[in-house]
Amino acid sequence: ARGVVTDGETGIVVGDTTKGAGGTDCLIFKVDGSGDSVWLKTFGGAKDDGCLAALSDGDGGVYAAGYSHTAGGGAKEVGSVWRIDGSGSQLWQANVQSAAHNRLLALAPGARLGLFAVGQRGSGVAGGLDALLVALDPSGNVGGAVTLGKSGDDVARSVALYERGLAVVGERADAGGKSNGWLQRLDAWGARM
């Protein structure tokens, strides 16, 4: 399991499995208050797909973030967010495409009913790997993507909304293999503060 959300009575767990349509698929299951399975679903295609984070949608369902090689045509990994309703039906899948690999690792609710996702992009824009921040609207449309990073490899691990904007935390590994944590404050539009 990679993430869990609960409404106090039931829980939804996200992760990945090798028992789906492709090599690895996104696994999402719901349990009741006794821990008994209500439903179990896999999402993905012929290539590797996986869920790495969960966020309640506030309506009994879940947003799950991760990656999809299927949506990337198998040649590359795209960052993906799935919205699953309380009965286990997929409402939409949003994919963050680029010339390089993307992977989404954490989610946070946005100020206007949308959400933010963070992770890593193999863009080489500011180094070998860069941190990635993505804004999505309630229908799963990507409203924008911002690359964060300096020299070295960066990954964004968590994001939170606060009264003046966003806080993104992550880590950077330099060429010598040393890793350091960082905090980046951004306004609600993704601009550095």
Image (spheres, grey):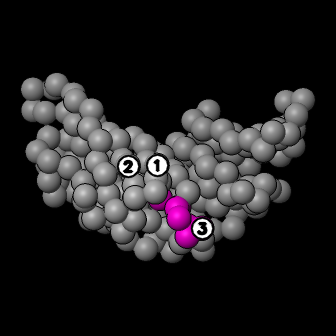
> Which labelled disc corresponds to residue 113?
3
Residues at badges 1 and 2 in contact (C-beta under 8 Å)?
A: yes
How packed mark 2 is, by other alpha carbons closer than 10 Å (few <14, some 14-19, many 20 or more), is some
Residue 76 or residue 35, whichever sits in front:
35
- How far apart in space, not on screen, are marks 3 and 2 (Cα)? 18 Å
Is residue 142 depicted above or below 177 in this figure? below
Residue 77 or residue 131, whichever sits in front:
131
Residue 144 appears in view: yes
Residue at point 64%, 42% (across, down): 14
Identity, as a three-letter code, of the amino acid under mark 2? Ala
Please say whether residue 139 is one of the residues in the magenta stretch. Answer: no
Sequence-first tag of 1 and 2: 1
Q: Which residues are magenta?
A: 110-117
Q: Which residue is mark 1?
A: 160
Q: Is residue 83 left or right of residue 110?
A: right
Q: Is residue 70 left or right of residue 138?
A: left
